[in-house]
Image (spheres, helix red, strand yellow):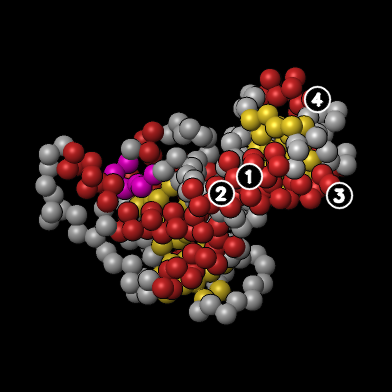
Amino acid sequence: MKVLINDPISDKGANLLQEKGYDLTRHHYKKDELVDKIPEYNAIIVRSATKVTKEVIDAASGLKVIARAGTGIDNIDHKYAESLGIKVINAPGANSSSAAELAIAHMFALARYIPQSKITMQKGEWNKKKFKGIELVGKTVGIMGFGRIGRITAKLTLGLGMQVIAYDIAEIDTDLDVTFKNKEEVLQEADFVVLHLPALDETFIGEKELKKMKNDAYLINGARGMLVDEKALLEALNNDAIAGAGLDVFVKEPPENMDLIKHEKTSVTPHIGAATQDAQDRVGIMIAENLIEALEN
């Protein structure tokens, strides 16, 4: 079996595939190159950088499995692939803790002015009295999307002494001390609105939703860039309609809206929610095991 690892996975995952006797190619081919190269392979492993489009799938004459080393599969035309008998698999949950922890890191960064403090200190400033932050203890976090990452975020924030409210389109059974509310109620009541949603066909947070949030509330998005109207968010920050935003994902990556990136009320990271060594080891091992099972069965 020939396997193309088009986006990096951990050595632990690759070693499992090599031990199985698979012929591995660990190289990133861009779209045009991938269309030319994909006929050589029986399986491909991707992360978020590679888009497995209909054009790529049509060129893949010997492809049996498309593996996403992560949770979401919206960068794969999975319905089309499956209609042709090509299996599409992923590694659900392997990076959930990392994504949840980054969301909370952004909450701390915004609450205690950590990005601004570093920037001003690097300029030689000492703004001890200027950066009067807030505590997370006692605040209300509103979690939009109560899947694996949302549940871990709830556990961690409850441990910090926060109140947790949540919204999800599905009915969720949980033993956690969480109150489920509708979308509008979460927006109106939360001090921190945290998005842990999958990709949707429409914007989830736009001008209307931002106006429902409290003026001293913060928006955290580590899910999908398309969920938030970046123009409306920038206007809300400029007009003090909300207190700040923590962003790990963007509509276009790398982002083009530099006014938003450089805004004094934002904490930003370059889509690193799953970028911990712990998560990458778990993802690599899980996707290798799932790929072996898919190819063998």
Q: Nearer the viewer, residue 136 or 96?
A: 96
> Is 124 situated left or right of 192 in this image?
left
> Is 30 situated left or right of 214 in this image?
right
For the question of whether residue 206 can be seen, the reply is: no
- Give how far across and how far down residue 235 sits, in percent: 39, 44
- Give how far across and how far down residue 71 sits, in percent: 63, 51
Q: Amino acid at mark 4?
A: Pro
- Give how far across and how far down residue 259 sits, in percent: 36, 35
Label 4, on which residue? 39
Residue at 19 percent across and 42 percent down: it is 120
Label 2, on which residue? 281
Q: Nearer the viewer, mark 4 or mark 1?
A: 1
As for residue 154 lying within the magenta part, the answer is: no
Along the polypeptide, which appears first: circle 3 or circle 1? 1
Measured Cα–Cα span from mark 3 to mark 2: 24 Å
Q: Amino acid at mark 3?
A: Asn
Along the polypeptide, which appears first: circle 2 or circle 4? 4
Measured Cα–Cα span from mark 2 to mark 1: 7 Å
> Is 172 situated left or right of 235 in this image?
right
Residue at 74 percent across and 32 percent down: it is 23
**Could you tell me which quadrant the N terminus lies in?**
top right
Q: What is the crowding at mark 4: few (fewer than 14 residues within 10 Å), some, or many (at least 20)?
A: some
Label 1, on which residue? 13
Along the polypeptide, which appears first: circle 4 or circle 1? 1
Numbered label attached to residue 168 = none
Measured Cα–Cα span from mark 3 to mark 1: 19 Å
Q: Amino acid at mark 1?
A: Gly
**Helix, strand or loop for disc 3:** loop
Measured Cα–Cα span from mark 4 to mark 1: 23 Å
Measured Cα–Cα span from mark 4 to mark 3: 21 Å
